[in-house]
Image (spheres, rainbow, N blue to C red):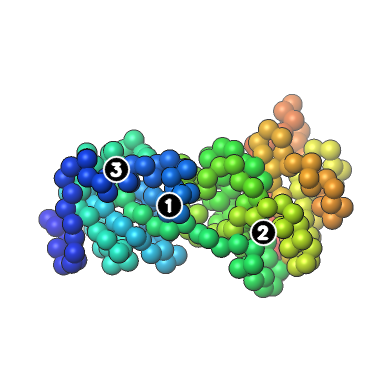
Amino acid sequence: MNFLKNISSIESISSTQNHRVKYWAKLRKGNFRRQEKVYLIEGFRELKLALQNNIEFIELAVVVENIINENEQNLIKEAALRSESIFSINKQILSKSTYRENPSGFLAITKQNNSNLNDIHLTGNPLILIVENIEKPGNLGALLRTSDAVGVDFIILVDPVTDIYNPNIIRSSQGSVFSVPFVIADGMSLNSWLKKNEVQMIAASPASEKLYWEIDFKLSTALLVGSENEGLSSYWNDFQNVKFVTVPMQGQVDSLNVSVASSVILYEGFRQRSQG
């Protein structure tokens, strides 16, 4: 059953040597994504969140016979209405073009976010997550997912070493990359911006004696998160307005995974703000 039969201008592609197929396959590489300023969306959970957050698509390619579930059909039809170009493809083309080993029945291409610090307009007392030099896609995806859960207003990526549009990040975030606004910034510009907007900065450190729940999260607050191995760079030690806190531990290990520690602290912010 061709549930897209009422959608006009569908182009059929049957060869893996087609120039569009080669283009999609190249988008699996971060350098090419950055060059083209676009990225791939795979997976129905991710597509649903993209649609809920009004993402527009440049291209949509569908293996029609793979879309048999009615909910999936409705998602694809809505995505088709938001797409500039629509292609009917086969399973072989989908496997060659997507990142996942067992891809869903579609791939979508959309533009990367080009927002910066100047585009952020603070209202009320925002809760911000600042991520510096996170290397593992799974950790960054988990941070995005937690940020969505606790109502982080936006995320600032400082000099990122991991491409936020990596398909593994989109998957591990379960599509939260679409629901939590984010910008990319350098450290110096960010520090000036935070001071200007009177945002308190906190960061976790095992050397601190201040417990994380002693922070007043009802104020405008930014949590600083550093790399898995090194933590925050020494750059931040030069700023006296960073409040270092500790997450107490009773076991024999001396640290938590960066996404776990961040989640613990962010949920304390969520708890305080939920109580008014």
Q: Earlier in the sequence, mark 2 or mark 1?
A: 1
**Amino acid at the residue labelled 1:** Glu
Q: Is 130 on the left-hand or right-hand side of 239? A: left
Give coordinates of residue 237: x percent, y percent.
83, 45
Of residues 220 and 106, which is closer to you in this image?
A: 106
Helix, strand or loop at label 1? It is helix
Q: Is 89 on the left-hand or right-hand side of 216? A: left
| Vertical arrangement, residue 82 with respect to residue 87, above or below | below
Tell me the residue that label 2 is attached to.
Answer: 128
Tell me the residue that label 3 is attached to.
Answer: 22
Q: Residue furthest top?
A: 252
**Amino acid at the residue labelled 2:** Ile
Location of the N terminus by quadrant is bottom left
Label 3 or label 2, whichever lies nearer to me, is: 3
How far apart are the two marked residues, 2 and 1, measured between alpha carbons?
29 Å
Disc 3 crowd rating (10 Å Cα; few below 14, some 14-19, many 20+) is some
How far apart are the two marked residues, 3 and 1, measured between alpha carbons?
14 Å
Residue pictured at 59% horizontal, 58% vertical: 183
Looking at the image, can residue 64 be seen?
no
| Vertical arrangement, residue 54 with respect to residue 252, above or below | below
How far apart are the two marked residues, 3 and 2, measured between alpha carbons?
39 Å
Residue pictured at 30% horizontal, 64% vertical: 84
Q: Earlier in the sequence, mark 3 or mark 2?
A: 3
Q: Is 177 on the left-hand or right-hand side of 156? A: left
Disc 1 crowd rating (10 Å Cα; few below 14, some 14-19, many 20+) is few
Residue pictured at 87% horizontal, 52% vertical: 240
Label 2 or label 1, whichever lies nearer to me, is: 1
Looking at the image, can residue 157 be seen?
yes
Location of the C terminus by quadrant is bottom right
Residue pictured at 68% horizontal, 33% vertical: 229
Name the mark on residue 36.
Answer: 1
Give coordinates of residue 54: x percent, y percent.
42, 67
